[in-house]
Image (cartoon, coloured by chain):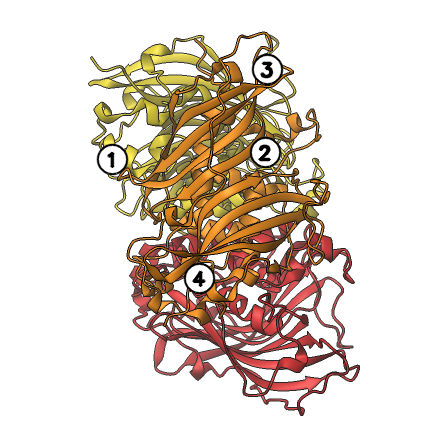
Chain colours: A orange, B red, C yellow
Amino acid sequence: MSKTSNGNFFEDFRVGQEFRHATPRTLTEADAALNVALYGSRFAVNSSDEFARAIGLPRAPLDDLLVFHVVIGKTVPDISLNAVANLGYAEFRWGVPVYPGDTLSAKSTVLGLRENSNKTSGVVWVRSTGVNQKGEMVLDYVRWVMVHKRDPQAPVQPVVVPKTAPSVKPEDLVVPAGLSIAGYDDGAAGSSHRWEDYAPGERIDHVSGMTVEDSDHMFSTRLYQNTARVHFDAYAGKQTRFGRRLAYGGHVISLMRALSFNGLANGFRVAAFNAGSHVGPTFGGDTIYAWSEVLESAPLPGRADVGALRIRSIATKDCPCGDWPGKGADGKYHPAVVLDLDYWVLMPRRLG
Amino acid sequence: MSKTSNGNFFEDFRVGQEFRHATPRTLTEADAALNVALYGSRFAVNSSDEFARAIGLPRAPLDDLLVFHVVIGKTVPDISLNAVANLGYAEFRWGVPVYPGDTLSAKSTVLGLRENSNKTSGVVWVRSTGVNQKGEMVLDYVRWVMVHKRDPQAPVQPVVVPKTAPSVKPEDLVVPAGLSIAGYDDGAAGSSHRWEDYAPGERIDHVSGMTVEDSDHMFSTRLYQNTARVHFDAYAGKQTRFGRRLAYGGHVISLMRALSFNGLANGFRVAAFNAGSHVGPTFGGDTIYAWSEVLESAPLPGRADVGALRIRSIATKDCPCGDWPGKGADGKYHPAVVLDLDYWVLMPRRLG
Amino acid sequence: MSKTSNGNFFEDFRVGQEFRHATPRTLTEADAALNVALYGSRFAVNSSDEFARAIGLPRAPLDDLLVFHVVIGKTVPDISLNAVANLGYAEFRWGVPVYPGDTLSAKSTVLGLRENSNKTSGVVWVRSTGVNQKGEMVLDYVRWVMVHKRDPQAPVQPVVVPKTAPSVKPEDLVVPAGLSIAGYDDGAAGSSHRWEDYAPGERIDHVSGMTVEDSDHMFSTRLYQNTARVHFDAYAGKQTRFGRRLAYGGHVISLMRALSFNGLANGFRVAAFNAGSHVGPTFGGDTIYAWSEVLESAPLPGRADVGALRIRSIATKDCPCGDWPGKGADGKYHPAVVLDLDYWVLMPRRLG
């Protein structure tokens, strides 16, 4: 028996199969600092222990997207080492905040399988859950990914396509326990715009661009212990359809989020993804820009102090977003678009 | 009202105007390690908790220049997002040491304004102050910066040019409370040369060079939450007069300081900048070298154990410093010079 | 007397000479995170405090190779600043584990000297020892390195060539105090293969490749406060025989170790190097691959729960290792080989 894992191929998966992923990781203050160094994030709640304490949290929680990167990274060796492409996310919800010192681990269950007609690959749906050392859920989501077959002739399992919710309901969003908005300091946070100030249909150009170097996206992807080969191997990359390494899609999500500070500075917590698509590849040397549209504004049950904004953010490469490059009436994306993400953020409300 | 900030332009400033800058930041052990990783700094007091405790400090303080980077980074969105160039520093003085766990925030007051004759920009003088979570001053300085006008036709404020001191007086330098040089270990610090061994006029070639990659200077500048666009956006950089991204000037200052260890290893604290000029731009791929001249040697009032050395350090790019490239008799700099900094360091004295 | 150190040259060394190296360093959680970010290491014991506690350790120890990098980095200014090449390692043994908060320092003794026949350089043997703040040994090894002469005409010391052991004996390997394998979790560690499953002669292809960027190897080498100029100075690098910067050899060792997780995931501790050779240079842009062969399997005296595997790992550049590129019958290496390392790892045994 070979001691080297080459990951699972499409024909290896079974509906109901469970994976307990390897390498639990204790996150620390270093992960917080590196998240800033990699993306330039400026959300005050993740930057300042004092700010976090003033709103009832024990200290600055780690960036929500960092939690995503760590959890998804753990699933790669079992789920997506042989992925063709990451196709989508649904029912993607953050749970308890993660603090320095917490140890995260992850597990997944296969929900669905559908071979592609060319028989060289198939789509695998999994539900993955990240938990902390107390077993509390920190992140839970459905992801579907196209995975190569090892052998096109291999028999496959019957088709099962799971139903996923089109979006996360506001009442299912997790508000961190103990959160108390009375102490929220707009000046320190960098914006006086609160939940009431955003209306569906409003568009925000986040203005600045951030160039991705190969060294940067490899650094982050290694930090998350994500082993997807396409990101690390320039030699093998020459043989791919792109002819080069591909930046980890999550790196682009975090850059988009950091850029979105300019216009959404009080969106202090990413609470859920409703849907997301990595529309195009990002490579070293590309400069990422972003713009957002407010899709929906929702109060949260039992909370007069925090509301939810459903945001759609589009990230582009080498294309400033003053003209709102997005998806045309023909369903086709502007060629510069690399990410289209529909998500919920929590934002303080004006207090009575 | 747009929720996106494009920063202030020259005509937006008023003398006496105050800014409380956004995004307080809790610094941690990670910032200490990253400061080493980014510059290769080897000053023992910042590297070893044991060394720091032996001289009466609670633990290793964070690098003085790191404090500068964090404070100046916070001021960028309000003061210098639309800067043409950073022109100078004065009355630049460090206060209480900063330790892991401290949270820094910053505020600024506009001291002066002077429109340029071409009316497309003007000079803004600000006093900026960084404080820790107890409100104690960690850094205080005057900076002047040339800022674009949004509209050349816009009316501007009357000219006010503040007077700044030509240098910081030795008696105004802050010696960390509790400092006790008796436990200072020259062997661990890497040099047997103490304050008495340096004489005005002495020149020191720091020998080694350090190449700056684009990934490196972007990494540090993001870490300091500095949003100046010229450092991050290769796409927009193509349209600038340089045709590319520009390294953050503070990155060069920290490289110079790290290189200066070879010759100034016992200059354990940067206590003040008297004057400083970013003489030329630095780009990814440039290799930084440095040399220093001792300008002045000053005892400190009431301290027989620590003295101050006033140093002028010149940093160059792609030019080793054995021939002391600097400013000629004609007032022109050698073309390789990128930084000319006049500053005070504290150094242990020989004990009686 | 110049205050700038240019390092020692061959004629400066004396057998018996002792060096206490400068700049003690307190290692922190940040060093742990950066080790992951730089190499993508996934060994659970270094990644998770929970995992480490379950096997009787107080928390996750820092990566063994990180300890090596820090200790060897400290020796560079005194021993190998003027090195031509690093020639070999022997009697290379880790001691007590290193935890965040520990402060490491290093000292060396010259064991041997032999001038080369061309009189431009010579070989220096040193024994170097790293200790923590309690004076406990964390790493102890013999290294020999070829060092330039300042002056080919300079007289040199008599030839002394020390005898070094051909390998470290299993009974001399240090098992961390308190280690208790009963709580070792194969699932979290990522492999069900234990000590009994590996037999001498077995070969393992570690499959994946990792590309080294100049920014990456400079970042790690600065983090270890290693001042060897060949790694940092692209300008001077143009004048060398390689025409460019050279990656720190230890960076390649750590990449090899991280890649070896795929096949050796339960080799939770590097306990000793028996011999090692940096066969060829690595540059920015090279992609590192690795394969291993089990040389020997040894029980450890008094331990039924942990065994030692003697591994030989070969790292290559731009050459996947499915065909086991190594050393031919003629004693010549495959041109892609950059590292040949013979070392001991500790691995859990099956419990009765």
In the visual, does A76 lie left or right of B315? left
In the visual, does C124 lie left or right of A232? left
**Disc 4 on helix, strand or loop?**
helix
Within-10-Å neighbours for mark 3: few <14, some 14–19, many 20+: some
Q: CA distance from mark 4 to mark 3?
A: 52 Å
Residue A189 or residue C198, whichever sits in front: A189
Q: As shown in the figure, which amino acid type bears the numbered disc 3?
A: Pro
Q: As shown in the figure, which amino acid type bears the numbered disc 4?
A: Ala
Q: Which residue is mark 2?
A: A231
Q: CA distance from mark 1 to mark 3?
A: 39 Å
In the visual, does C333 lie left or right of B241? left
Q: Which residue is mark 3?
A: C325
Q: CA distance from mark 1 to mark 2?
A: 33 Å
Which chain is disc 4 placed on? A
Dots 2 and 4: beta carbons under 8 Å?
no
For the residues beneath circles 1 and 3, the answer to whether they share a chain is yes
Q: CA distance from mark 2 to mark 4?
A: 30 Å
Q: CA distance from mark 2 to mark 3?
A: 24 Å
Q: Nearer the viewer, mark 1 or mark 2?
A: 2
For the residues beneath circles 1 and 2, the answer to whether they share a chain is no
Q: Which residue is mark 1?
A: C53
Q: Could you tell me residue C283's position as x and y percent?
A: 64, 35
Q: Nearer the viewer, mark 2 or mark 4?
A: 4
Residue A198 or residue C19, whichever sits in front: A198
From this view, report whether residue B272 is shown above or below residue A348.
below
Which chain is disc 1 placed on? C
